[in-house]
Image: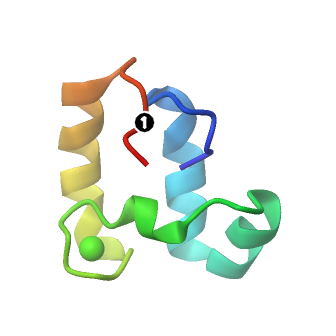
Amino acid sequence: MNCDGVINLGDINPFSQALAFPVQWTMTYPGCQIQNGDINGDGTTDMRDINPFSNWLSQHMGEPCPL
Ligand SMILES: [Ca+2]
């Protein structure tokens, strides 16, 4: 969610920011796609992605970001 190319703890705050303040997130991470946070694949990055994000993060920690 911070577009540094790696899945790690550094994505947690940007993910939270994307949910709460998507416009601010877009300005903070220009060029990043907010859809990166659509972990459950329903087409929207929202509160329903929190638990999937947490699970996904723990399963893929340290891996290259797929997006
Ligand atoms: Ca979603």
Residue occupying image coordinates x 43% and y 69% = 35
Quarter occupied by residue 29: bottom right
Image check: 61 left or right of 24?
Answer: left
Q: Mark 1 points at which residue?
A: 65
For image coordinates 30% across by 35% down, the residue present is 57
Q: Is mark 1 on a helix, strand or loop?
A: loop
Within-10-Å neighbours for mark 1: few <14, some 14–19, many 20+? some
Position of 38 relative to 21 (above/below): above
Judged left or right of residue 28, residue 51 is left
Q: Nearer the viewer, residue 27 or 32?
A: 32
Kindly identify the residue that appears in the image at 18 percent across and 28 percent down.
Answer: 59
Colour setting: rainbow
Query: Residue 19 placed where, x, y %?
Result: 50, 71
Quadrant of the rendered image containing residue 2? top right
Residue 39 coordinates in the image, percent (x, y): 26, 60
Q: How many marks?
A: 1
Q: Looking at numbered disc 1 in the image, what kind of residue is underneath it?
A: Cys
